[in-house]
């Protein structure tokens, strides 16, 4: 039998925003046996809701060499070949575009030398993307010249064209900005030319600073970034129009540090929405989801479902979907067992979890997405049209009986089954607790009453300057009961509406500061005890 050959797929991720991944990149990651990253920061891409990674896939971070600098291309190549030589399908995940920004040609050549096939899935180059994220229109008279100098070397041959172009874009590392300035001046660029440098381009931590060309070294020092961090320097006419086109760093929540007290497997849609508005979110698990103490009730319900005991199954949370799915897998069942059943979901998020399982819900409330909203749209039992009057309702041990009571009034017999237990999580790290209490978070988004109670219980109350956003009136009431001033309440109990409402609050707050002629100050930057501007 022929031995399977390894395959290496070089995948570009763009400058830092995971939403720039291509469909080819998503597919490659899904099928990978091993994933090799340059730095730990790239691991966050694997948490994006659109990404599926095999749990058995090995994730390898190359990291830095012993001298604190990126390893030589030959060292990176050895790592890649070692993982592919035994027939594995290896994804080499790199920033920007593989051949333009990341210099992986040596790694590809090593694959060829060792008889390993490779392919390239291009990514958005940071040379073009970061200027656009920074509000720089590259279509300018005089032309644009791009330079990738991640090795920090600026030779006379390389810089010969720098003086002749209208706009110059250089990607390099923070530690060699001084060398770049010297090379630019020696090449004929004016020492007092307007320049801009962007740090962490394309991410929610992006920062841009203006100054004369010769001031770039000081601006870099003030930014306090590591010497090996990638930076982008832009010179020329395009920089002068930047304030008119600054779209990314002026997003309503840009630079906000937002606390997300949720279980990690449920935070994806929420954190992605926050990132879309420019926020940097940090997840703090407040709830641990565990199986019920006794599995007999769930076992009986699943057998009844397969045997045709129920007319409806009602899911009131993503965790309920997960609990039933796991129980199905124990029995070797799949979504086909729901054939002939009617399925209801409390809202779009729960509906999406069902769809991911291959089940299209028959009922999702169009108005209020809550247990009460689902009950309001539930059809009454009809002894002629409905052959069976039973409803299977898998839920948490602490869930309210609102839906069960309302369905009973409609003539249905509800089998209310504890599918999972919610247990308070362990306290977060000491530095996170300190950040919560001292106002280092700009906002906290609460998605249920239990997240309010549990966060306060394990970490204490957020600081008075921190913006509090609640997913609905019930959660807002719990916040108030715990001594928290609620600033934002979403009109619908959905995470997208919650984040949209927080962004609207932040936009009004920003406009107030601007109208008053002052600088926009984030909540975390306000002095202790000062009165916050309110919308």
Image: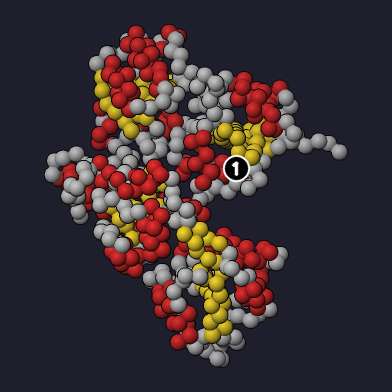
Question: In the image, residue 350 lies at what x, y percent?
Answer: 49, 64
Callout count = 1
Seen at 61% across and 70% down, the residue is: 294
Query: Which image quarter holds the C terminus?
Result: bottom left
> In the visual, does 248 lie left or right of 272?
left
Q: Is residue 356 above or below residue 124?
A: below
Q: Quadrant of residue 475?
A: bottom left
The percent position of residue 217, horizontal first and vertical second, equals 32, 19
The colour mode here is secondary structure
Corner quadrant of residue 113: top right
> Image quadrant of residue 80?
top right
Q: Residue at x 56, y 75 (%)?
A: 417
Residue 354 in view of the camera: no
Q: Nearer the viewer, residue 67 or 151?
A: 67
Crowding at dot 1, Cα within 10 Å, few <14 / some 14-19 / many 20+, comes out as many
Quadrant for the N terminus in the image: top right
Extreme residue toward the left, this view: 516
Q: Check disc 1 and report the residue beneath it.
A: 29
Residue drawn at x 30%, y 45% as measured from the top left? 438
* 87 displayed left or right of 122: right
Q: Secondary structure at mark 1?
A: helix
Position of residue 80 in the picture relative to residue 531 (left or right): right
Whether residue 430 appears in this view of the structure is yes
Furthest toward the bottom, the residue is 384
Comparing 132 with 523, the one in front is 523
Q: What x and y, as percent, mark residue 315? A: 52, 70
| Residue lying at 52% horizontally and 23% vertically, measured from the top left | 70
Residue 113 as seen in the image, left or right of residue 213: right
- What percent of the width, then of the height, locates residue 355? 55, 63
């Amino acid at each position: 039998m022929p031995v399977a050959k390894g395959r290496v797929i070089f995948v570009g991720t763009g400058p830092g925003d995971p939403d720039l991944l291509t469909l080819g990149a998503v597919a490659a990651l899904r099928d990978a046996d091993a994933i090799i990253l340059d730095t730990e920061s790239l691991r966050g891409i694997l948490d994006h809701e659109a990404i599926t990674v095999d749990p058995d896939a090995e994730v390898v971070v190359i990291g830095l060499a012993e001298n604190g600098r990126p390893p030589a291309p030959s060292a990176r190549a050895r790592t890649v070949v070692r993982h592919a030589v035994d027939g594995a399908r290896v994804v080499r995940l790199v920033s920007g575009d593989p051949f333009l920004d990341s210099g992986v040609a040596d790694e590809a050549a090593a694959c060829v030398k060792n008889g390993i096939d490779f392919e390239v899935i291009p990514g958005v180059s940071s040379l073009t993307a970061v200027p656009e994220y920074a509000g720089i229109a590259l279509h300018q008279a005089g032309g644009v010249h791009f330079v990738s100098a991640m090795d920090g070397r600026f030779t006379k041959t390389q810089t010969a064209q720098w003086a002749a172009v209208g706009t110059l874009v250089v990607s390099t590392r923070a530690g060699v900005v001084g060398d770049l300035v010297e090379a630019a001046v020696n090449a004929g660029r004016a020492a007092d030319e307007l320049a801009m440098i962007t740090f962490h381009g394309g991410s929610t931590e992006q920062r841009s600073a203006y100054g004369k060309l010769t001031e770039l070294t000081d601006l870099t020092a003030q930014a306090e970034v590591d010497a090996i961090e990638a930076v982008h320097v832009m010179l020329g006419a395009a920089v002068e129009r930047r304030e008119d086109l600054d779209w990314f760093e002026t997003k309503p929540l840009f630079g906000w540090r937002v606390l997300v007290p949720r279980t990690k497997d449920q935070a994806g849609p929420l954190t992605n929405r926050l990132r879309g508005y420019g926020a940097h979110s940090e997840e703090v698990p407040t709830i641990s989801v565990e199986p019920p103490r006794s599995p007999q009730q769930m076992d009986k319900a699943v057998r009844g479902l397969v045997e045709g005991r129920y007319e409806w199954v009602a899911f009131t949370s993503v965790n309920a979907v997960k609990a039933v799915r796991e129980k199905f897998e124990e029995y070797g069942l799949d979504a086909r067992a729901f054939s002939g059943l009617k399925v209801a979901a409390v809202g779009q998020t729960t509906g999406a979890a069902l769809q991911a399982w291959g089940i299209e819900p028959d009922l999702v409330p169009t108005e209020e997405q809550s247990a009460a909203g689902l009950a309001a749209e539930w059809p009454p039992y009809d002894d002629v049209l409905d052959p069976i009057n039973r409803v299977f309702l898998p839920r948490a041990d602490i869930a309210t009986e609102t839906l069960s009571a309302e369905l009973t009034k409609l003539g249905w017999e509800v089998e209310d089954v504890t599918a999972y237990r919610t247990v308070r999580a362990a306290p977060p790290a000491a530095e996170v607790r300190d950040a919560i209490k001292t106002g280092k978070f700009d906002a906290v988004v609460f998605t249920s009453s239990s997240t309010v109670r549990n966060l306060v219980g394990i970490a204490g109350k957020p600081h008075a300057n921190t913006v509090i956003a609640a997913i609905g009136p019930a959660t807002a009431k719990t916040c108030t009961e715990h001594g928290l001033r609620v600033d934002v309440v979403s009109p619908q109990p959905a995470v997208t509406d919650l984040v949209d409402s927080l962004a609207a609050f932040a936009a009004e707050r920003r406009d107030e500061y601007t109208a008053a002629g002052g600088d926009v100050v984030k909540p975390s930057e306000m002095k202790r005890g000062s009165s916050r501007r309110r919308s």
